[in-house]
Image (tube, rainbow, N blue to C red):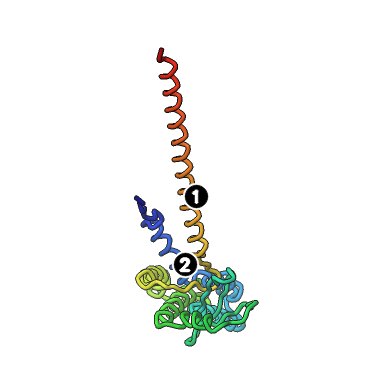
Amino acid sequence: MTTVTKDEDSTPTQKTIASAANLANLLPTGTVLAFQTLIPSFSNNGACHPANIGLSISIILICALICFFSSFTDSFIDSTDGKFYYGIITRDGMHILNPRAKEVTDDETKRLRKYRIKPIDYFHAFLSLIVFLIFALTDLNVKNCFFPEAGDDLNQIIINLPLGAGVFVSFLFTIFPTTRRGIGYTQPRANKEKKSGNMTSTTTTTSKRSDLEMGSVVVGGAEAEARASITTSTP
């Protein structure tokens, strides 16, 4: 009789890690980090001249566009050649950016249509954009540049708004996760996992058969020795 055991990897810990990876994919962490790296120089550490104001507005707009359009990117590993492909999702499907060595067939075109834009993608894009704009406009250098005479009430909003927005949007992203991988987020190769699973089960079955054969040899040898001892002891 064959006993089927459940995979121990589907644990609450794995689900928590998957949720954290989903948040890292959706939240504009990279865009915010790039913005915070550039804004001190562009804003002259908050002491803005007319040129610094233009530069600060430019970096805010550029990072906002990158944050928004990054929600409309996806990637996958082709099961036929095992290569990693990434591209931009459209209403008709997915437009692959990196070059391919082979021509796109009709079956692949149908498969790429599964990656077309969905309403949830717009939802994720606007939330990511809102989070970035909140973090950008409440930055200390931006605040000193555009709101140098801010009152105590505005300062309290600037201090607490990013934390509240980040927690609230993270909660929404957890409730409405995404299947998009974006650019730079790989996915496991299911075919290899299946193959390795089959190889493991084959190896286990072979080892069990070997153990049974060895056990039969040992039992047979013990029976032969017992018969020989009985024959010797008989007058």
How far apart are labels 2 and 1 at the CA level? 38 Å
Give the mark nearest the N terminus, 2 or 1: 2
- In this view, the residue farthest toward the bottom is 92
Task: Name the element at disc 1.
Answer: helix
- Vertically, is 182 above or below 196? below
Nearest to the observer: residue 234 or residue 149:
234
Task: Tell me the kind of residue under disc 2.
Answer: Ala
| Relative to 104, 21 lies left or right | left
**Res. 65 visible in picture:** no
User: Residue visible at 55% across and 69% down?
Assistant: 184
- Vertically, is 190 above or below 138? above
- In this view, the residue farthest toward the front is 235
Nearest to the observer: residue 113 or residue 127:
113
- Vertically, is 223 above or below 186? above
Question: Where does the C terminus fall, quadrant-wise?
Answer: top left
| Relative to 113, 11 lies left or right | left
Nearest to the observer: residue 234 or residue 4:
234
Task: Tell me the kind of residue under disc 1.
Answer: Thr
How far across and how far down the image is residue 226, in percent?
42, 23
Answer with the quarter of the image where residue 10 lies: bottom left
Other-residue count near label 1 (Cα within 10 Å), few / some / many at <14 / 14–19 / ≥20: few
How far across and how far down the image is residue 123, in percent?
40, 80
The residue tagged 2 is 24
User: Residue visible at 39% across and 73% down?
Assistant: 157
- Vertically, is 89 above or below 198? below
Answer with the quarter of the image where residue 102 lies: bottom right
Task: Name the element at disc 2.
Answer: helix
Question: Do the numbered discs 2 and 1 sit on residues whose CB atoms are within 8 Å?
Answer: no
**Res. 101 visible in picture:** yes
The residue tagged 1 is 203
How far across and how far down the image is residue 21, in percent?
45, 65
How far across and how far down the image is residue 214, in percent?
47, 37
